[in-house]
Image: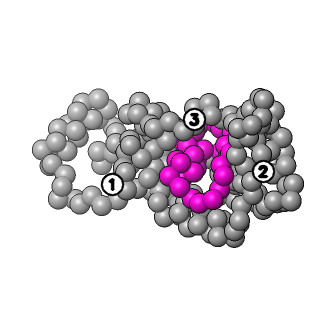
């Protein structure tokens, strides 16, 4: 979506699940929480930040005005750097600088993380405090129930069906293994796994 289209949507619909407006003077906590929420929200397909716009406090109804971003190169570099470092996995936003009404704005597309990588969270805060979801036009801190949704959506085998990558053979309780083999033999004496 082009920056001018994002501004038109903001003025027509206000902020909503897929678009957030920010002044964009610096990369603060609020902007990174929105990035985290866009990356996490299931089925949203990510979202857009439009940097360089603010709500016009003088307008009769809610409208957004272009205030511009003074140093778009620095803002883009700071955003890319922080998104690669502050989360448990790197988030790779895509940025486009454009001029609207004589001022520069930045449209930032934040992709939804794959289900296998969710939840995305602030590494320093841990879980659940460091994870956010996009609910309506808000970035909401995750709860334990939200984390259960993310883990349930992960593809692949359950942990009891896979090999533990750092498990050691001497960690296996041989008496439990013998009981398991005995029960398998009782259920199916011809089971190939008993050979």
Which is more toward the observer, 105 or 182?
105
Magenta span: 18-46
Q: In the structure shown, which secondary structural element does the residue marked by tag 1 occupy? A: loop
Q: Could you tell whether 6 is left or right of 120 in the image? A: right
Residue 22 x %, y %: 65, 49
Between discs 1 and 2, the one toward the N terminus:
2
Between discs 1 and 3, the one toward the N terminus:
3
Q: In the structure shown, which secondary structural element does the residue marked by tag 2 occupy? A: strand
Q: In the drawing, what numbered circle is on residue 164?
A: 1
Residue drawn at x 22%, y 38% as measured from the top left: 180
- Do residues under tags 1 and 3 come within 8 Å of each other at their CB atoms? no
Q: CA distance from mark 1 to mark 3?
A: 38 Å
Q: In the drawing, what numbered circle is on residue 66?
A: 2
Q: CA distance from mark 1 to mark 2?
A: 53 Å
Q: Is residue 34 magenta?
A: yes
Q: Is residue 51 magenta?
A: no
Which residue in the protein does label 3 denote?
138
Residue drawn at x 83%, y 40% as measured from the top left: 8
Q: Nearer the viewer, mark 3 or mark 2?
A: 2
Which is more toward the observer, 17 or 20?
20
Against 185, residue 93 (above or below) is below
Residue 68 x %, y %: 75, 57
Q: Nearer the viewer, mark 1 or mark 3?
A: 3
Residue 183 figure quarter: top left
How crowded is the residue under tag 3: few (<14 C-alpha within 10 Å), some, or many (20+)? Answer: some
């Amino acid at each position: 979506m082009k920056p001018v289209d994002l501004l038109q949507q903001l003025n027509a619909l206000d902020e909503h699940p897929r678009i957030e407006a920010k002044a964009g003077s610096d990369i603060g906590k609020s902007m990174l929480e929105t990035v985290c929420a866009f990356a996490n929200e299931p089925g949203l397909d990510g979202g857009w930040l439009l940097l360089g716009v603010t709500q016009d406090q003088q307008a009769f109804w809610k409208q957004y005005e272009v205030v511009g971003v003074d140093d778009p190169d620095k803002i883009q570099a700071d955003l890319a750097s922080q998104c690669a470092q502050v989360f448990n996995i790197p988030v790779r936003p895509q940025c486009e600088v454009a001029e609207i009404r004589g001022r520069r704005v930045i449209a930032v597309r934040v992709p939804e993380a794959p289900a296998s990588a969710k939840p995305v969270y602030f590494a320093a805060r841990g879980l659940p405090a460091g994870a956010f979801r996009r609910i309506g036009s808000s970035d909401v801190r995750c709860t334990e129930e939200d984390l259960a949704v993310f883990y349930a959506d992960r593809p692949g085998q359950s942990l009891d069906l896979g090999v533990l990558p750092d498990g050691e053979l001497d960690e296996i309780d041989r008496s439990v293994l013998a009981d398991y083999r005995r029960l398998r033999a009782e259920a199916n004496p011809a089971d190939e796994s008993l050979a």
